[in-house]
Image (cartoon, rainbow, N blue to C red):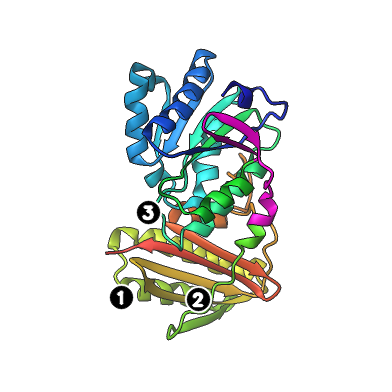
Amino acid sequence: MTGVAAQAEPFVHPALFYADEAAYLSGTVPFLEAGLAKDEPVAVAVPAANLALLRDALGRDAERVGLIDMEQAGRNPGRIIPRVLRAFADAHPGRHVRIIGEPIWQSRSAEEYPACVQHEALINHAFTGRTVTILCPYDTSRLDERVLTDARATHPVLIEGGVELPSQMYAPDRVVADYNLPLAVPRDVDGLDFDADLLPEARRYATRRALALGLPGNRHDDFALAVAELTTNSVVHGGGSGTVRVWVEGGHLVCEVRDRGLLDDPMAGRRPAAPGQIGGRGLLLVHYLSDLVRLHSGSEGTTVRSYFRCP
């Protein structure tokens, strides 16, 4: 891994392709140990099974590594950059930081995947110019070829079989655009149109419907706050009005807000708020509160869907 760390660009973002535990460990443990040997801040954010694997392989050195269960912290891919990667890197200003981040695993759903691949593409913008290396493992024995093809487009460096090469397919902005997919209006789901005067009614409508559809009581406040942020964004930034819908889909309660606005910043909601920042936290907060956020924006308007797990 010394070649990855030694490249001229201060931010390095390699994809590690592995097919079994031995390849996983041979590609990750030396990377971590090299950082520890230089007294660099090191973190691992991977699914629970791989987290246990690395903890065992590192032995006592695991105490010097930030260990993060990505299945929990990164369940919503949209909060990985601000709440996991940037949170760790920003805690160590002026130092080279190493992170292993594994945001895509076999059981990721079809609804989650577009947000996952956009996350991988946007890492390249989130850390440009910073002395950070983020190594992203990909399980070639379990992930389908589309995922591996996308990984080649979202990572400038590829590592496979111990060989490190620049990716000839690297095109992160194209990936972000390709996965800016229209979200069809759900069939047989009523909605409520709102404007500034009807904001309170829109919020009451959404929360009442969510509770009737089975939203757990301990998620009521999170849901209500997400609805408030999304509907306010529509009024302030989306042309002054919007439509809110709520339904159940695939074990999630979904709140959708549509408006006529255009969101042309793909990093919106994925940047941590700067100290003292006034405003600009709405979509970031929605990412923190939700189990998944899907978003599409184009010439016809913007749609944001916030997902909450429910029994």
Q: Quadrant of residue 234?
A: bottom right
Q: Residue at x 53, y 56 (%)?
A: 146
**Mark closer to the observer (2, 3):** 3
Q: Which residues are magenta?
A: 156-175
First along the sequence among labels 2 and 3: 3
Q: In this picture, is 50 found above or below 196?
A: above
The label on residue 107 is 3
Look at mark 1 in the image and give the residue it sits on.
Answer: 212
Q: How far across and how far down the image is residue 290, in percent?
A: 44, 57
Q: Is residue 200 visible?
A: yes
Q: In this picture, is 93 found above or below 72?
A: above
Q: Say what amino acid the circle numbered 2 marks.
A: Val
Look at mark 2 in the image and give the residue it sits on.
Answer: 244
Q: How far across and how far down the image is residue 245, in percent?
A: 47, 77
First along the sequence among labels 1 and 2: 1
First along the sequence among labels 1 and 3: 3
